[in-house]
Amino acid sequence: MHLLLRTLLLLITSRRRRPLGLWETSQLRLRVLPTDVDLALHVNNGMYFSLMDLGRFDLMVRSGAWDTLRARGWSPVVNLETITFRKSLDLWQRYTMATRIIGVDERAIYFEQRMVAGGELYARAYIATRLVSAAGPVPNEDIFAAVGQPPADLVLPEFLHRWREENALPSTRRPAPHLW
């Protein structure tokens, strides 16, 4: 919620930036703001995922996919995510967030996102996303018919297949009791 105004501003400003293809890489230049940090004055670990939403929105808006999805009543949701940290991003530090789609499978579209400062990798995340409608998950065939087919050479890395299988929760149509 605390990124709501920043997200709305990004949705406007991304339309003024150079258009991108959906399968290209978005580079979003940002600065660490006081609302991004914790008591140690660096980006809070949970904040990275919220900031990464901005990178995915930037790619979607600049590629034209955002308008297409919204016109159909589709909304993006994160299904699975993981992040690795290398260095801390500190208050007021400038950095670039790189966002690209790195593959698809029958259930998700996968993004790789990186936080980079001074040409150095600070953090990297992998995010599995879905599109949902009032009727439920949107099949990939419908998505690709609307936004275009992925490039033929876009192959999801094998480790992400295993990651998804090993970390997936049961379908919402099956029971998932909490038993410890």
Image: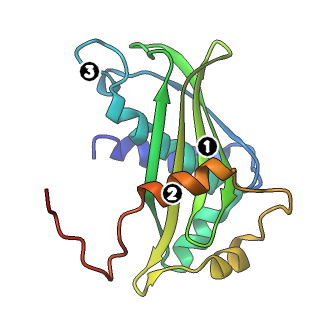
Q: Earlier in the sequence, mark 3 or mark 1?
A: 3
Looking at the picture, which amino acid does disc 2 mark? Arg
Mark nearer the viewer, 1 or 2? 2
Contact flag, marks 1 and 2 (Cβ < 8 Å) = no
Distance from disc 3 to disc 2, alpha carbons, whole Å, reads 30 Å
Number of other residues with Cα within 10 Å of mark 1, as a class: few under 14, some 14 to 19, many 20 or more:
many
Q: Which residue is mark 1?
A: 112
Mark 2: few, some, or many residues within 10 Å (few <14, many ≥20)? some
- The residue labelled by disc 2 is 164
Q: Nearer the viewer, mark 3 or mark 1?
A: 1
Q: Could you tell me which secondary element the residue under label 3 belongs to?
A: loop
33 relative to 61 in the view: left or right: left
Q: Which residue is mark 3?
A: 38
Mark toward the start of the polypeptide (1 vs 2): 1
Q: Residue at x 27, y 12 (%)?
A: 40
Please tell me which of labels 3 and 2 falls first in the chain. 3
Horizontal placement of 180 versus 18: left or right?
left
Q: Residue furthest front?
A: 180
Q: Is residue 158 left or right of residue 53?
A: right
